[in-house]
Image (cartoon, grey):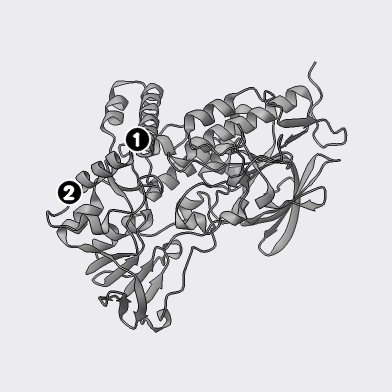
């Protein structure tokens, strides 16, 4: 298939955000030409990458999914393959799958103000190629896709079994009847453990410190009732609003009354675990709820597996690997034939793309984020990163709407360059991702920063985000619009 060398909009990433951005672009600005560049050979991003047993969403698909294509399935918390199929079906329905260029790893992008043009460098099958665009939209998220975080453990080379990271799960791994240790306490670990326990001889979740874990229903009873009684669009709207309100309420309550939420989480665990279970040892972190993301357990499957004895939790530190397991600091020894290192992910800012503006490299840690969507002093560039306290795609969706609204305004007024300008270079700054998880703190120094004045902070309040991103584009004076006569595809000034 022949691909154009220039498009109006270039979208980086064919995951859930990139596909959503392309679908909305075709609806909001059908006159715009576009392409999606995807480094991997398949659509779906994270949902195609992760293949470990039990992989699933930890947010309900009524809010994780697209508002313009509501999820109507019976389950609210769904398995990874269902999410992937939903993304693929959406891309096909809106006809954007034909605009994806697979195996295209973007390495750099250079902006030329005189041309109002991005020149994007990429590799396809080892060959270097370039293309140009008027706008660059980065929908690559912030995870590194080529490998996960893999710390070195003392003596790991002595282990005679297999050591596996969930991001690189072998398709043919046989764990039936084997002893498995999963190192980690986050969402991946609590997902893997009950899934592996269905076939393994025994699964041990080894954690250095606990995480907050909460059981959530796999099915949304109200959503399923509304789907039977009301038109699809109305039912979906009510369900989505209800679930957004619930997510925001839980987060706000955790922030304002953390001890109350701690008490509820502990009470919930007591209802699902044996009477003598050491809840305070294994499920009582030394931080407040939502200082890190809560781990969701659909229909309590993790706790059911613990109660049956199919799996167990050990809270301790690793002294060393041995040939047949793990030696702990306490002196305890865990036998294992397979060790799964659910030790987290590595982050990668903007997919590792090196940006430059008029020949000067963009130093990301020196750039500020505007409205959670643009970078200071980087023209015609936007990105999408979700909030951590609600379904990630909720923030992404309103960012997409905002960016396409900016493009529509530029077309109406004849502008072809738009730059977010920091109005106060002396404003205080802090990390863009203000979140306590270890995988975040390890990489914060590589990311842009947020400011301390309105519109330059990375809010974790969805209602505030909606207000800010729906406000008048020129109200705060931060966006600098320009006309460049020599720009390609320039739209004449509307009369």
Relative to residue 16, is residue 271 drawn left or right?
left
Q: Say what secondary structure mark 1 lies in.
A: helix
Q: Nearer the viewer, residue 33 or 54?
A: 54
Residue 59 image offset from top left, x and y in percent = 38, 42
Within 10 Å of disc 2 (Cα), the crowding (few <14, some 14-19, many 20+) is some
Q: Residue at x 53, y 28 (%)?
A: 466
Relative to residue 485, is residue 424 drawn left or right?
left
Relative to residue 199, is residue 30 drawn left or right?
right
Q: Residue at x 71, y 63 (%)?
A: 127
Q: Nearer the viewer, mark 2 or mark 1?
A: 1
* Residue 193 seen in the current view: yes
Q: CA distance from mark 2 to mark 1?
A: 21 Å
Residue, disc 1: 253
Residue 246 image offset from top left, x and y in percent = 35, 32
Relative to residue 393, is residue 408 drawn left or right?
right
Indicate whether 408 appears above or below 159. above
Where residue 200 sits, quadrant-wise, is bottom left
Where residue 194 sits, quadrant-wise, is bottom left
Q: Residue at x 73, y 36 (%)?
A: 421
Q: Nearer the viewer, residue 449 or 410?
A: 449
| Residue at the far top in the pictured view | 495
Residue, disc 2: 270
Residue 154 image offset from top left, x and y in percent = 42, 78
* Residue 102 seen in the current view: no
Q: Quadrant of the C terminus?
A: top right
Which mark, by number, is residue 175?
Answer: none
| Residue at the far left in the pictured view | 275
Q: Say what secondary structure mark 2 lies in.
A: helix
* Residue contact between numbered discs 2 and 1, judged by CB atoms under 8 Å: no
């Amino acid at each position: 298939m022949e691909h154009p060398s220039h498009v109006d909009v270039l979208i980086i990433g064919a995951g859930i955000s990139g596909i959503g951005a392309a679908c909305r672009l075709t609806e909001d600005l059908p006159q715009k030409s576009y392409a999606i560049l995807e480094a991997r050979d398949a659509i779906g991003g994270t949902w195609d990458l992760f293949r470990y047993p039990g992989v699933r969403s930890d947010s309900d698909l009524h809010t994780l999914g697209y508002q313009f294509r509501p999820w109507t399935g019976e389950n609210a918390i769904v398995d990874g393959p269902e999410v992937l199929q939903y993304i693929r079906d959406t891309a096909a329905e809106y006809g954007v799958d034909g605009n994806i260029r697979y195996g295209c790893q973007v390495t750099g992008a250079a902006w030329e103000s005189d041309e109002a043009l991005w020149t994007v460098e990429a590799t396809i099958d080892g060959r270097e190629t370039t293309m140009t665009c008027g706008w660059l939209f980065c929908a690559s998220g912030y995870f590194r896709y080529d490998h996960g975080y893999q710390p070195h453990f003392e003596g790991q080379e002595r282990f005679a079994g297999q050591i596996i990271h969930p991001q690189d799960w072998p398709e043919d791994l046989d764990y039936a009847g084997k002893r498995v240790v999963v190192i980690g306490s986050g969402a991946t670990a609590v997902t893997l453990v009950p899934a592996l326990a269905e076939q393994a001889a025994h699964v041990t979740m080894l954690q250095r410190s606990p995480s907050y874990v909460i059981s959530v229903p796999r099915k949304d009873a109200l959503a399923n009732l509304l789907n039977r009684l009301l038109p699809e669009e109305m039912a979906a709207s009510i369900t989505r609003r209800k679930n957004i309100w619930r997510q925001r309420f839980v987060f706000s309550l955790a922030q304002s009354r953390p001890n109350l939420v701690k008490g509820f989480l502990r009470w919930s665990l007591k209802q699902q675990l044996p009477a003598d279970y050491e809840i305070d040892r294994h499920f009582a972190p030394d931080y407040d709820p939502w200082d890190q993301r809560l781990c969701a357990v659909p229909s309590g499957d993790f706790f059911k597996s613990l109660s049956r004895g199919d799996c167990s939790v050990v809270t301790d530190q690793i002294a060393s690997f041995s040939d047949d397991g793990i030696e702990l600091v306490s002196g305890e020894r865990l036998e294992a034939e397979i060790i799964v290192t659910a030790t987290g992910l590595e982050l990668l800012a903007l997919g590792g793309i090196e940006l430059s503006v008029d020949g000067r490299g963009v130093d990301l840690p020196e750039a500020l984020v505007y409205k959670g969507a643009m970078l200071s002093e980087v023209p015609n560039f936007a990105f999408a990163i979700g909030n951590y306290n609600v379904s990630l795609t909720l923030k992404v969706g309103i960012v997409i709407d905002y960016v396409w609204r900016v493009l529509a305004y530029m077309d109406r007024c004849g502008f072809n360059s738009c730059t977010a300008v920091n109005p106060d270079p002396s404003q205080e700054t802090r990390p863009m991702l203000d979140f306590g998880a270890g995988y975040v703190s390890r990489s914060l120094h590589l990311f842009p920063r947020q400011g301390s004045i309105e519109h330059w902070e990375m809010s974790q309040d969805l209602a505030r985000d909606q207000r800010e991103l729906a406000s008048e584009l020129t109200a705060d004076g931060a966006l600098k619009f320009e006309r460049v006569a020599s720009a390609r595809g320039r739209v004449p000034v509307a009369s």
